[in-house]
């Protein structure tokens, strides 16, 4: 017993020593403009105060600030007598070094923190913090100097007297530097027509602008010619005997895979040049912030989606797997969009605030993380439902290649599921506009029973997983064709039926019916969409808050069903926007019934004629046969898909990998050669907008039909295409019949203006 008590006491004493609290130190905080300041409200600030705050992240120290009314000489006396423990900024002198110990540099002057020579523990703790700051945030010193002294003062501190004299001579003689790149290509340094562009040229322009240096870009690299090389690396011809290398562009930890483009890359200055130039450029590179460097990389490289086609294409199931690969990529885009949506109102500019408001930032991050987790859990199965059908039916087509009927059935269901997945993507991306009230209702004529039947069929696989009996009935609908906002209606029903499936236990029942009711307005009818289930149900208390964001019934947690609580909030906003009404009845243990009632216009002959007239151009394949088309697309997979249906229509197709190649081909072939151009928007070298403007400028009195095929699907994207001179904007993944009918219509209207 005595041994056990001694052991416990030993552990407690050891734990007390191992996890001792921070040491309290007294800091000499004398009045020093820009370095130590106290406002009228008593708030502290200045370079020295921010320095200590940065150090507190790594040093096990708490500060007590004393002596604001004292002088620098008072500080030295107080430090020597033990009244304070440290003070800065101090410059190294023989006199001070005899009495005090100096830290690592904490300023560009350079400046130091000084402590008593006997206080080695404190000195080690201070130096440890400074080393951590130098490793994790190499630009902290430059950033603080700019904050309190501005760029001009920073330059005076950074440049030596010899360097300033060199610059004055350079300016006075109006000299010009010549820079080059060993590999003058995209995205590093290249010529775009007569304009030099590229990541390295943009970065050098920042350094040159800062120091008033004039320069020109030389495209031909010659080892014997003494030029400044922007993409130099150690080990290049001549080595250190011929070149002076600046520090690398990237000195931080890498936070983005695209950063590897510049890893190990320097500016090389010929040793024949004045040494002051190499020194100025080295300091210029050191002044480049990681944020600026990454912004230049993103400007030219951006985000590139990996190409999965080579892994998915199967020799004996080409058609089915093409559909599958398209929708898998769409699913990935949807997942990224959901994350963006969850953080859209949460992520703000926190770059500088993180240093001063740690508690607020941590709380903000925790809230955003929770919102993201809840949102993704709720949407996970909604993405997987159509994706499961796509992958499953693709595999089925592979197994039954000899059966035409099975393959056609699989392809049909892949197309239906893919269309639904695409619709889901468009609706998710429109949620941001719902919040700001900018969603535009898109009403069109629709066969309501047929549309709802197709909509319900996509739920069958999901219902079968839980052996739920899913029944839908549209027999009471008398006026089948109506004018409705199908997108918003689907989104409302999607959330309601999804909730019914989630909160109905295994072997339960979900019933969806549509009832047509009379309306007092001529030419309209009221449709009652009812979704009922025999699931968990909800309490009356919870029904009062069901439309609140992230609202959830406690019983749903007990059941193990995951959900975010956003679905009904979205439903309520859409229902109000549609001018409809919603009613929910529920009891715990008995299930839930939801009614959505909306007034819809009954379609007339005029609506039917307009709807059918949109695709009438497709009925004349003879108009497309033999027509010459220029397909402008940088993605090989997309080119293959488009080339296939264009050649099936017996059209003559030319290929251009980017906008610049397209402009060149149009100029070579002449104004009357191509009957139509299909133009991608986002491409390297020259995008679709620039290419279209160049073609229109080349032939201002002729009009070649140009159709944008773009993954940018918003209305503002369409307006941007039209403003660039295109005739129409079709969103990817494109519908073949829609593309051909649009081409047919535009070629019929083609007119050459003299």
Image (cartoon, rainbow, N blue to C red):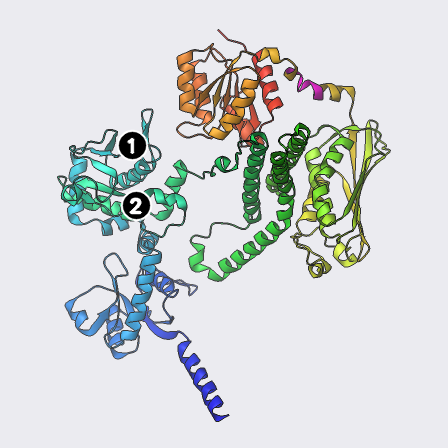
Residue at image position (32%, 70%) is 125
Question: Mark 2 or mark 1, which is nearer the start of the sequence?
Answer: 1
Q: Is residue 30 visible?
A: no
What predominant SS class does the magenta segment belong to? helix
The residue labelled by disc 2 is 249
Residue 488: horizontal and vertical position, in percent?
A: 69, 37
The nearer-to-camera label among 1 and 2 is 1
Residue at image position (47%, 39%) is 306
In this view of the protein, which residue sits in the foreground, 228 or 98? Answer: 228
Residue 286: horizontal and vertical position, in percent?
A: 28, 48
In this view of the protein, which residue sits in the foreground, 390 or 346? Answer: 390
Look at the image and give the residue range highlighted in magenta.
Answer: 611-617
Q: Quadrant of residue 82?
A: bottom left
Crowdedness of circle 2 by 10 Å Cα count: few (<14), some, many (20+)?
Answer: many
Q: Quadrant of residue 124?
A: bottom left
Regarding mark 1 in the picture, which secondary structure is present there?
A: loop
The residue labelled by disc 1 is 184
Residue 263: horizontal and vertical position, in percent?
A: 32, 45
Residue 721: horizontal and vertical position, in percent?
A: 52, 26
């Amino acid at each position: 017993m005595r041994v056990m008590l001694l052991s416990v006491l030993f552990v407690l004493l050891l734990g007390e020593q191992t996890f001792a609290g921070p040491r309290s130190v007294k800091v000499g905080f004398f009045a020093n403009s820009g370095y130590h300041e106290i406002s009228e409200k008593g708030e502290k600030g200045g370079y020295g105060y921010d320095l200590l705050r940065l150090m507190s992240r790594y040093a096990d120290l708490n500060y007590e600030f004393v002596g604001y009314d004292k002088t620098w000489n008072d500080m030295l006396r107080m430090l020597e007598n033990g009244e304070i423990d440290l003070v800065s900024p101090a410059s190294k002198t023989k006199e001070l070094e005899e009495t005090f110990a100096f830290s690592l540099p904490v300023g560009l002057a350079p400046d130091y923190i000084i402590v008593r020579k006997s206080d080695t523990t404190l000195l080690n703790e201070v130096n440890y913090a400074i080393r951590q700051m130098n490793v994790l945030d190499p630009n902290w010193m430059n950033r603080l100097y700019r904050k309190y002294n501005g760029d001009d003062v920073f330059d005076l501190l950074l440049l030596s007297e010899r360097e300033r004299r060199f610059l004055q001579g350079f300016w006075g003689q109006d000299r010009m530097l010549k820079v080059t790149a060993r590999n003058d290509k995209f995205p590093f340094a290249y010529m775009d027509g007569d304009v030099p562009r590229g990541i390295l040229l943009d970065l050098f322009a920042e350094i040159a602008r800062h120091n008033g240096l004039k320069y020109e870009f030389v495209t031909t690299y010659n080892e014997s010619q003494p030029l400044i090389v922007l993409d130099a690396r150690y080990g290049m011809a001549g080595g250190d005997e011929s070149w002076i290398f600046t520090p690398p562009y990237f000195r931080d930890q890498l936070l983005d895979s695209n950063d590897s483009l510049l890893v190990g890359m320097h500016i090389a200055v010929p040793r024949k040049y004045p040494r002051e130039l190499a020194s100025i450029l080295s300091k210029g590179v050191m002044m480049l912030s990681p944020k600026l460097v990454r912004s230049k990389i993103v400007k030219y490289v951006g985000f590139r989606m990996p190409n999965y086609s080579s892994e998915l294409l199967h020799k004996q199931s080409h058609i089915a797997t093409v559909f599958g690969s398209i929708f898998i990529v769409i699913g990935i885009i949807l997942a990224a969009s959901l994350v963006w949506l969850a953080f859209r109102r949460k992520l703000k500019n926190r770059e500088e605030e993180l240093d001063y408001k740690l508690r607020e930032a941590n709380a903000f991050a925790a809230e955003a993380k929770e919102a993201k987790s809840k949102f993704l859990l709720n949407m996970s199965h909604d993405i997987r439902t159509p994706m499961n059908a796509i992958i499953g039916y693709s595999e089925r087509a592979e197994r039954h290649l000899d059966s035409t009927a099975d393959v056609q059935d699989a392809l049909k269901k892949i197309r239906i599921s893919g269309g639904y997945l695409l619709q889901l993507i468009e609706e998710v991306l429109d949620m941001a506009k719902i919040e700001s009230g900018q969603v535009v209702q898109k009403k069109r004529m629709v066969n309501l029973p047929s549309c709802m039947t197709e909509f319900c069929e996509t739920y069958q696989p999901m219902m079968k997983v839980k052996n739920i009996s899913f029944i839908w009935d549209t027999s009471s609908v008398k006026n089948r064709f109506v004018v409705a906002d199908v997108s918003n209606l689907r989104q409302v029903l999607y959330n309601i039926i999804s909730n019914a499936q989630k909160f109905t236990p295994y072997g339960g029942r979900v019933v969806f019916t549509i009832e047509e009711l009379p309306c007092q307005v001529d030419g309209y009818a009221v449709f009652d969409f009812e979704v009922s289930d025999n699931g968990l149900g909800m309490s009356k208390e919870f029904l009062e808050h069901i439309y609140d964001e992230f609202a959830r019934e406690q019983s749903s947690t007990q059941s193990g069903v995951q959900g975010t609580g956003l679905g009904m909030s979205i439903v309520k906003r859409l229902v109000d926007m549609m001018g409809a009404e919603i009613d929910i009845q529920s009891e715990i243990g008995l299930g839930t019934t939801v009614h959505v009632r909306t007034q819809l216009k009954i379609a007339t002959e005029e609506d039917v004629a307009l709807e059918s007239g949109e695709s009438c151009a497709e009925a004349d394949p003879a108009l497309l046969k033999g027509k010459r088309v220029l397909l402008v697309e940088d993605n090989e997979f997309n080119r293959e898909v488009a080339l296939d249906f264009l050649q099936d229509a017996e059209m003559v197709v030319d290929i251009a990998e980017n906008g610049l190649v397209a402009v060149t081909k149009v100029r070579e072939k002449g104004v009357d050669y191509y009957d139509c151009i299909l133009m991608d928007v986002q491409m390297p070298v020259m995008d679709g907008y620039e290419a279209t403007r160049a073609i229109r400028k080349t032939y201002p009195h002729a009009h070649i039909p140009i159709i944008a095929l773009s993954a940018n699907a918003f209305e503002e994207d369409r307006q941007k295409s039209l403003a660039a001179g295109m005739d129409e904007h079709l969103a990817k993944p494109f519908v073949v019949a829609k593309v051909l009918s649009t081409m047919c219509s535009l070629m019929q209207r083609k007119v050459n203006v003299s």
